[in-house]
């Protein structure tokens, strides 16, 4: 009999027992509607491998990953070329997580995966709000005639939670009508206190990694210069740590565009720090 030890391909520091965990990490390797550079479907696996380069302790939040009590369920397997069935699979699996009294932490994949997560969660939580970190507005009604697009994900989510319950941080690119939507509905945040109006609500945090500057994360599908630093992103997390966070995801890493592996390492640390505030 082999005695090992053997390499673990789950996220570092996870609770191997689903039943006793509080948060379920769910890999969502889908990039079927990407409008520029595909490849984010490879992110969940690469992020898991890179996680072993981190420590389990966050000096920023003075917590260990064991304090978070999360279970890595692995990647869902999607039918290639079938967006609607993929979204249905995500929604059904996220529903199962919340039926079991747990919370989801999704790892994409492209940003459209957030939509079925929100659809599922909205059946379990009222007064739901979304804090959206991104370079792009993602507020289109459709892209090239396709409604189900990562370019439209936050617009679709706003129809579930209400546009007044969307707060967007780091946005620096979008169509004129999308900026008009943000202005009309006061979604764009410039300072921490802009989030205070949703503090009593149930918060889902979605982080598109292109909110970070391209000098930090070049490995993404739609890089956009002029973004925030890692420390600026974490400062927002610090402000959010006392909010009632009922779910989160981190999306849009396309690891193969950064052969140094640095983008993947940054993504992994973003995930660790976001887990610490849940």
Image (spheres, grey):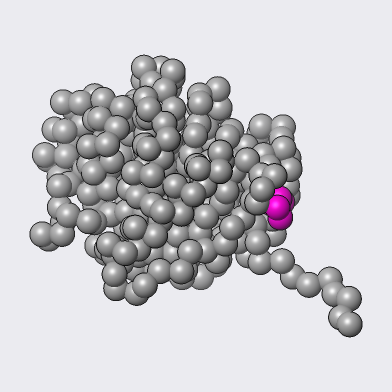
Residue at left 56%, top 43%? Answer: 100
Closer to us: 164 or 120: 120
Vertical relation: 145 (above or below) 239: below
274 and 84: which one is in front? 84
Where is residue 9 drawn, in percent x and y?
A: 66, 66
Q: Where does the N terminus fall, quadrant-wise? A: bottom right
Q: Quadrant of the C terminus?
A: top right
Q: Is residue 138 left or right of residue 78?
A: left
Which residue is at a point 52% across and 47% down the rendered structure image? 97
Q: Residue at x 64, y 57 (%)?
A: 11
Query: Which of these two is toward me, 89 or 233?
Result: 89
* Most common secondary structure along the magenta stretch: loop
Give the percent coordinates (x, y) of residue 175: 15, 45
Residue nearest the observer in this picture, 265 or 99:
99
Q: Quadrant of residue 148?
A: bottom left
* Image x and y of residue 39, in percent: 39, 69
* Residue found farthest to the bottom: 1
Image coordinates for residue 71, horizontal then vertical, percent: 64, 51
- Total labels drawn: 0
Q: What segment carries the magenta color?
A: 13-17
Q: Is residue 12 left or right of residue 104?
A: right
């Amino acid at each position: 009999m082999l005695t090992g030890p053997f390499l673990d391909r789950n996220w570092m520091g996870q609770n191997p027992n689903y039943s006793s965990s509080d948060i379920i990490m769910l890999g969502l390797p889908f990039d079927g509607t990407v409008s520029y550079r595909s490849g984010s479907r490879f992110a969940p696996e690469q992020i898991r491998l890179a996680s072993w380069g981190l420590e389990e302790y966050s000096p920023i939040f003075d917590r260990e990953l064991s304090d978070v009590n999360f279970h890595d369920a692995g990647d869902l397997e999607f039918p290639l070329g079938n967006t609607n069935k993929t979204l249905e699979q995500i929604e059904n699996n996220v529903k199962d997580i919340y039926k079991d009294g747990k919370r989801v932490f999704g790892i994409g994949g492209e940003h459209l995966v957030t939509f079925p997560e929100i659809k599922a969660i909205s059946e379990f939580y009222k007064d739901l709000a979304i804090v959206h970190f991104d370079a792009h507005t993602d507020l289109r009604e459709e892209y090239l005639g396709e409604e189900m697009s990562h370019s439209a994900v936050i617009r679709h989510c706003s129809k579930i939670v209400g546009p007044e319950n969307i707060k967007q941080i780091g946005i620096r690119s979008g169509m004129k009508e999308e900026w008009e939507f943000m202005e009309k509905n006061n979604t764009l945040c410039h300072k921490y206190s802009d989030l205070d109006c949703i503090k009593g609500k149930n918060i889902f945090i979605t982080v598109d990694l292109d909110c970070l500057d391209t000098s930090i994360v070049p490995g993404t599908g739609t890089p956009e210069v002029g973004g925030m630093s890692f420390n600026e992103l974490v400062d927002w997390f610090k402000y959010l740590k006392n909010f009632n966070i009922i779910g989160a995801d981190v999306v849009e890493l396309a690891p193969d565009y950064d052969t140094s592996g640095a983008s993947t390492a940054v993504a992994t640390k973003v995930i660790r720090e976001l887990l610490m505030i849940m």
